[in-house]
Amino acid sequence: SLVELGFVPALEQLVFDQKLPFLGICVGMQVLFEHSEEGNTPCLGWIPGKVKRFPESVRVPQIGWNRLKFRGNHRLTEGIPEPAYFYFVNSFYVEPASDQVTIGTAEYGIDFCALAASDNIYAAQFHIEKSGAVGLAMLKNFAAIVGDAHVD
């Protein structure tokens, strides 16, 4: 794990002390929250909230394209037309403690947070890198955010 390998202090120094923009993708989103139902696992706790399993009424994992609904305007979603479809492979979803961090939602049996932002921490439940032109546009937006960061 990141803790056992000793990576967490270095990551936290970059993300919290130097304010380096950070992007978690898929499971990378989930580990940013406080706790996961998967194996009753403590996570990094960088974003308050928990990771929950989809209801039994839906088939897991969710595999395929799903519509993302943006909430408001955000640099990460700038210039991406709606409806925008992204590629998902997941059995779990995040439930942020504050709805304020949710900048995009999707529906799979329930509406869930699929895109989050908290200060310089960004997270996507879907695979940006497998999502074609809209994924590339989002990665370019994140690269612009990184480019604007003032990091020592």
Image (tube, helix red, strand yellow):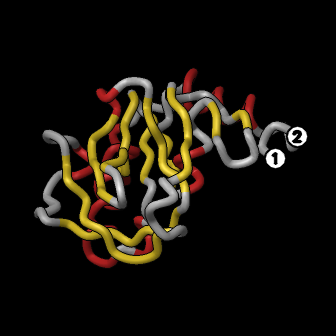
Residue 63 at x, y percent in the picture: 46, 75
x then y, percent, for residue 49: 51, 29
In the image, 113: left or right of 15? left
Residue depicted at x 22% and y 52%: 77
Amino acid at the residue labelled 1: Ser
Q: Is residue 21 above or below residue 99?
A: below
For this rendering, which residue is in front, 121 or 148?
121
- How packed mark 2 is, by other alpha carbons closer than 10 Å (few <14, some 14-19, many 20 or more), is few
Tag on residue 35?
A: none
152 to 140, vertically: above or below: above
Asked whether disc 2 touches disc 1, contact meaning CB atoms under 8 Å apart, the reply is yes
Q: Which mark is residue 1?
A: 1
Note whether 151 is above or below 56 in the view shown. above
Determine the image quadrant of residue 120. Answer: top left
Residue at the farthest right position: 4
Instruction: Report the side of 147 relative to 93 (left or right).
Output: left
Q: Residue 57's quadrant in the figure? A: bottom left
**Is 7 or 14 nearer to us in this picture?**
7
Residue in the image at 59% along x and 54% along y: 27
Locate residue 142 relative to residue 129 in the image: left or right. Answer: left
Query: Which residue in the protein does label 2 denote?
Result: 4
